[in-house]
Image (spheres, rainbow, N blue to C red):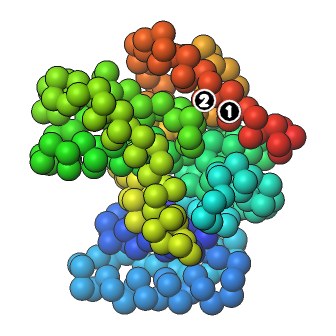
Amino acid sequence: MRTRISVIGAGMVGGTCAQRLAERGYADVVLLDIVEGLARGKALDILESLPVVGSDARVHGTSSYDDVRGSEVVVVTSGIARKPGMTREDLVMTNAKVIREVCENISRVAPESIIVMVTNPLDAMVQLALHVTKLDRTRVIGQSGILDSARLRTFIAEELSVSASSVNAYILGGHGNTMVALPRLSSVGGVPLLDLLSQERVDALVERAVNGGAEIVQLLKTGSAFYAPAAAAVSMVDAIVLDKREILPCAVRLEGEYGIDGVVVGVPVKLGAAGVEQVLQLELSASEKQALLRSADAVRETVAIMGL
């Protein structure tokens, strides 16, 4: 039997996730949306593109959760997108209602799946999904640090006119304004970033990465980022389905690591077929650790809005 991956939500992020996954060809894809016809239309369009790119994956659009049954991984992108002037925290109550219903259905039809959460506010939605599904923290994880780190890597690569593949950079913490960049541990071709750029330039690049989502929202006017978030989410699915045991910054509930307990924030994890196989603990400076603790406190405040 072929591996099945489901994507819940056929908006711009969900549709792009489904397309990228289908083009990989290692699994069949179910795209679900409650808007009648939306998922079926996008799925058919993706399916008709696959002969061109050489993939034999099957893509099925649906509005029924029964079609999600048997999925190895479920990617959740449902909810409203951020609008100009709206913070991620502004989204919490609207998207919490959506995610609660989605997770109840996943528990019913695919209780053995691993859930990759993409909906914002990301860390709070992962926390809610854990609460609703009662799954172990290893099987409910969020896409955050991969996207944030990719933005920083992009800006560093542009600044230095080098390949982004030569840039190593991590952003940890909550997926919002309190995210924690680690330029001290960043490098380009093995050379410490701070040996190549002034602290002032590094600070400017970090600030742009932290506000990367808002910059795109302001430019688009009527939407938010979807290409990069989808690519980041699919990289997590790759690591799980292909059992890559790749080290990726993901949103996971910490249980004492970094001095944080019971709160979801982004940290490096080993991601494989079992989900989160290990939480890696970086040696942080005192200021970096304090910043991460402040980020965790911000997530707690958002989670408290939901009454969890």
Residue drawn at (36%, 48%) of the image: 151
Give the structural element (helix, strand or loop) at label 1.
helix
Q: What amino acid is found at the position of numbered circle 1 in the picture?
A: Ala
Residue 256 position (above or below residue 111): above
> What's the distance in space between the residues labelled 1 and 2, CA to CA?
5 Å
Classify residue 300 by image quadrant. Answer: top right
Residue 296 relative to residue 90: left or right: left
Residue drawn at (63%, 34%) of the image: 264
Closer to the camera in the image, 290 or 276: 290
Closer to the camera in the image, 84 or 300: 84
Residue 19 appears at what percent x and percent y?
A: 40, 73
Can residue 72 be spotted in the picture?
A: no
Residue 81 appears at what percent x and percent y?
A: 62, 65
Residue drawn at (24%, 85%) of the image: 52
Residue 45 appears at what percent x and percent y?
A: 43, 88
Which residue of the protein is positioned furthest toward the top in this rendering? 286
Dot 1: few (<14), some (14–19), or many (≥20) neighbours within 10 Å? many
Residue 80 relative to residue 20: left or right: right
Q: Are marks 1 and 2 in contact (CB under 8 Å)?
A: yes
Closer to the camera in the image, 302 or 202: 202
Q: What amino acid is found at the position of numbered circle 2 in the picture?
A: Ser
Residue 295 tag number = 2
User: What residue is shown with label 1?
Assistant: 298
Residue 272 relative to residue 73: left or right: left
Residue 38 appears at what percent x and percent y?
A: 60, 85
Classify residue 135 by image quadrant. Answer: top right
Residue 8 position (above or below residue 158): below
Q: In which quarter of the image is the C terminus?
A: top right
